[in-house]
């Protein structure tokens, strides 16, 4: 049948053997390096992909980290602002309290000063009145007391003299 | 006069007073001492001699004897010599004053001075003397003086005690009282 079909089995066998040899040679000397090269290439690409994935993950992680940091920074900033506001309010309250205290002290001092000046003026006026009264009485009495009045004054002092009064050195009648 | 001199004068006066009292010669001693004091007061040269450090004590004694031998008792004369001996003759004035004070004290006599703006009448003077004698229990030897500055009333001093009933003082007190008035 092979003859009828023109098939030369020998040829086919030789072709097959040659093919096998070729396959063997190819497998032995060509496909190995090619596979190795391909595997290496695949590994490289996979490595690159992994690297890219890792970088991406890192980026995502960094982004998340940044976002967290931003949130934290925002929180801190908000806290700081609130603290600063509180501090400012405390400072304002303190300043206001001090200003009020100073104002009250100034008012009190002014009031005391006014009172002192008033007392001083009143005392001065009182002393002047006392001096004027003394001078007026002195002028009125000097040389104007009638003999009867002089006599009566002397009699009153004489009548008032007692042992007790004399015992007090310098006492007045 | 220094305080020490006054103490010494009191000591000498007391010694003379005690001696005179013992000899019953208080009056004559007082008279003699007063005479010597009057002579010393009226003759400054005598005091200068008695105080002079270059004149000897015997010379001073001699001078005093010639001056007072006939007029003072031996007791006073010897007392005077004692003062010279102790270099205390210069304080005869103080000794005399202290002696008078001791005699007055012994006899219950107190000196009083009344100051008035106008002269006191006899009746006022008598009344004052009587009142002072009653108050002190002593015989009062009263002297009066006029000082118009007291304006009216009376100031009496008996020894170191005083009653001031003058108008001037009352006016001063009134002024001080007015100055103490509290004003609001």
Image: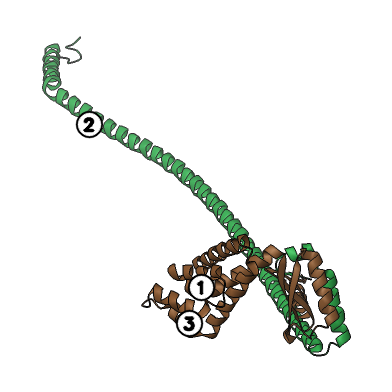
Quadrant where the C terminus of chain B is found in the figure? bottom right
Callout 3: residue from which chain? B
Residue A89 place in picture, x, y as percent: 59, 55
Say if A76 sits above or below B182 in the image.
above
Q: Give the chain ID for the green colour.
A: A
Q: Report the colour scheme.
A: by chain
Q: Nearer the viewer, mark 2 or mark 1?
A: 1
The residue most toward the top is A1
Q: Nearer the viewer, mark 3 or mark 1?
A: 3
Q: Callout 3: helix, strand or loop?
A: helix
Comparing A150 with A39, the one in front is: A150
Residue B61 place in picture, x, y as percent: 44, 74
What shade does chain B have? brown
Looking at the image, which residue is at 12% across and 19% down? A28
Asked if residue A109 can be seen in this view, the reply is no
Spatial separation of the CA atoms under disc 2 and disc 3: 157 Å
Q: Earlier in the sequence, mark 3 or mark 1?
A: 3
Q: Nearer the viewer, mark 2 or mark 3?
A: 3
Spatial separation of the CA atoms under disc 3 and disc 1: 13 Å
Callout 1: residue from which chain? B
Q: Is residue A65 left or right of residue A126?
A: left
Looking at the image, which residue is at 51% across and 45% down? A75
Q: Callout 1: helix, strand or loop?
A: helix
Reading the image, the residue beneath label 1 is B91
Q: Quadrant of residue A3?
A: top left
Reading the image, the residue beneath label 2 is A41
Looking at the image, which residue is at 54% across and 63% down? B11
Q: Callout 2: helix, strand or loop?
A: helix
Residue B98 place in picture, x, y as percent: 59, 68
Reading the image, the residue beneath label 3 is B46
Say if B120 sits above or below A167 in the image.
below
């Amino acid at each position: 049948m092979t003859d009828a079909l023109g098939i030369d089995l020998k040829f086919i066998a030789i072709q097959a053997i040659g093919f096998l040899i070729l396959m063997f040679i190819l497998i032995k000397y060509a496909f190995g390096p090619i596979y190795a090269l391909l595997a290496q290439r695949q590994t490289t690409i996979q490595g690159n992909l992994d690297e890219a994935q890792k970088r991406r993950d890192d980026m995502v992680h960094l982004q998340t980290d940044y976002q967290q940091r931003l949130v934290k920074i925002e929180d801190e900033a908000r806290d700081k602002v609130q603290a600063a506001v509180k501090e400012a309010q405390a400072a304002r309250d303190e300043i206001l309290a001090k200003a009020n205290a100073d104002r009250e002290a100034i008012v009190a001092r002014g009031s005391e000063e006014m009172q002192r000046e008033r007392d001083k003026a009143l005392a001065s006026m009182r002393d002047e009145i006392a001096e004027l009264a003394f001078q007026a009485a002195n002028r009125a009495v000097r040389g104007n007391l009638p003999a009867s009045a002089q006599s009566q004054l002397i009699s009153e002092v004489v009548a008032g003299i007692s042992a007790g009064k004399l015992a007090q050195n310098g006492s007045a009648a | 006069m220094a305080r020490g001199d006054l103490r010494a004068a009191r000591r000498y006066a007391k010694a003379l007073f005690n001696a005179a009292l013992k000899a019953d010669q208080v009056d004559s001693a007082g008279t003699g001492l007063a005479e010597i004091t009057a002579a010393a007061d009226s003759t400054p040269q005598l005091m200068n001699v008695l105080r002079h450090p270059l004149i000897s004590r015997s010379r001073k004694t001699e001078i005093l004897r010639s001056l007072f031998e006939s007029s003072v008792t031996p007791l006073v004369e010897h007392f005077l010599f004692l003062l010279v001996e102790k270099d205390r003759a210069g304080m005869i004035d103080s000794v005399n004053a202290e002696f008078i004070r001791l005699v007055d004290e012994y006899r219950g006599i107190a000196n009083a001075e009344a100051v008035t703006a106008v002269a006191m009448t006899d009746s006022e003077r008598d009344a004052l003397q009587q009142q002072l004698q009653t108050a002190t229990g002593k015989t009062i030897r009263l002297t009066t003086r006029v000082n118009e500055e007291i304006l009216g009333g009376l100031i009496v001093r008996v020894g170191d005690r005083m009653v001031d009933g003058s108008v001037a003082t009352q006016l001063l007190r009134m002024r001080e009282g007015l100055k103490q008035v509290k004003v609001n």
